[in-house]
Amino acid sequence: MFEKIIKRDRNEILESVLEQKDIDEKTKNLLQGILYKIEVSYNDYKKAKVINKTEKQYVDEIITNIKRKCNKIITVSFNDKIGSTQVKEELDKNKFYSDEKQIITYPIEEKLLYAIEKSTNNKKIVNTKYGIFSSVISDLIITGKNIDRVEVLRDFNGWSWTTVKSEIENIKANLVFQTLQILVGEEFMQNWTLDTDGFIDYFDLLKKEIGNKFGDEISKNMEDIIERISIINEANVNYSFKKDNMQKLNDIQIKINLINDVPKYINELTDKKKAAEREIANLQKILSSEKSIKEEYYKINDGVPIEKKIFSVKVLKQQIKTKIRELLSNIEEINNNLKPNNFIELKDNIYIEKNLFETIYYTKEEEEKLYIEFEKIFLKCFRKIIEEANEYNLVKLIYKFRYYMLLPFDETKNIKNVDSLENETIEIERELMKQAKKHKIISNNVPFEVWTHIFETRIIELDQLYYKIFLEYDKKYVQIFDEKISEEKYLINNIEKNKVNKKVKIFI
């Protein structure tokens, strides 16, 4: 009864918010449909994914997002005429269009929710000190977060759990986000994606969190791979970014060519230093007397359009002093670069930068290898988490690993089906089985040939699973099921002692 009251309240709150917005009736009906679908599906979603957030918290976040940012939402039919070519192209491609003023969507609840999340989430969540990585890592993580937010609608319907890969806006961004969320927790990722001022350096916190738990080497490797993946992701979705950084890579190569010719490099830096010193001397001469500064003032303003004039001698003095400070800083940088140790460090850093930006030229095979490496690091960390888990946490880890194994790796396969990860994932499955038997979570009689298949079942309640071994045309199969659902059968080869046609509960 209490839950029904809460759900009714959420509908009433949503209706109250929508009354203050420019939102048509079609959209209002879609939003009410979203709340209904969440009500039907959320318990299964929460159990399968092993998350702490309640349905009420999830719905309240949606309502808050609409209240904060979504002032105008229009739902159009697939055959409606759209005046703007840009809007039409975006609608055909993504099934929604959004800008700072409005959301236009086709009547698809999942796409409407995605558009709301995309419109309300922060655009940059990584400190600006990381330069180009500030934007590309932000884009990767925020895209993953947007996809994460619609999963309950997309994959769960109250009686089944199905993932249609073609409906996921960016499979790789989702893979990275979900992997990190399993590794460092939903609260950390939630706080990171909600950061608005950049005052807290969450990317640095992520590295420290991983370093403290799993070692500095793993943290450094993870940092390097996330940076590379972020560049790849941005290049794949943003052609302008790829084009700009192809030019940047050319500029880096020019620097490398120069720095490898040491005499030429030293001469060029020395010439730049001398030019800066001459310019400083000239500027200081101008500042040396009121007469010279006034002469410079009249000279600069002579024949210049009014919008480009300097309007006082005082302003000109400040500009000259600022320029002198910049030139002194350049000279200091040149002196540092000419020092042997600093020269070596500079050269190393340029090559590191070159190697990072060369990822924009990666082939599909090279990209896949990088994602495989990312997941192998995760699996190494997850193994350590299992070893340190108590009985209560171990059950959660079994559920989490099942969820992880069903994550789409690409358009054709899930993690469970990635051959390059098979050795690592089987090792994790064996360790989970070992610990589960040790803590008397599963029966000692459950063979690994049965156990491995619970990590590909989409029956929500793992602790309600049974298995049965049976013969069919002289071959042995195992079927996993609960009281309501029977999964597909799996061929098995190494089971001799288990009885045939006997229903056996997996979890004690």
Image: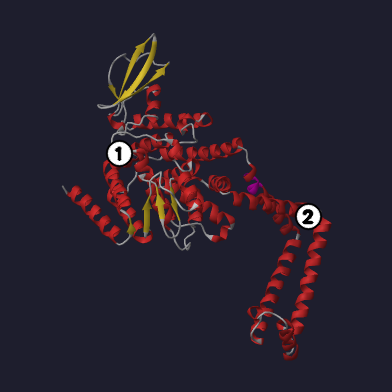
**What residue is at 17 percent from the left and 49 percent from the top?**
2
Q: Is residue 209 visible?
A: no
Q: Give the side of residue 55 with respect to residue 239, left or right.
A: left
Farthest residue to the bottom: give it.
Answer: 291
**What residue is at 41 percent from the left and 54 percent from the top?**
103
For label 2, the SS is: helix
Above or below: residue 248 compared with residue 312:
above
Above or below: residue 173 compared with residue 488:
below
Percent across and percent down for residue 443 are 31, 26
Magenta stretch bounds? 355-359
Figure quadrant of residue 506: top left
**What residue is at 55 percent from the left and 60 percent from the top?**
128
**What residue is at 39 percent from the left and 26 percent from the top?**
453
Figure quadrant of residue 154: top left
Q: Is residue 249 visible?
A: yes
Q: How is the image coloured?
A: secondary structure
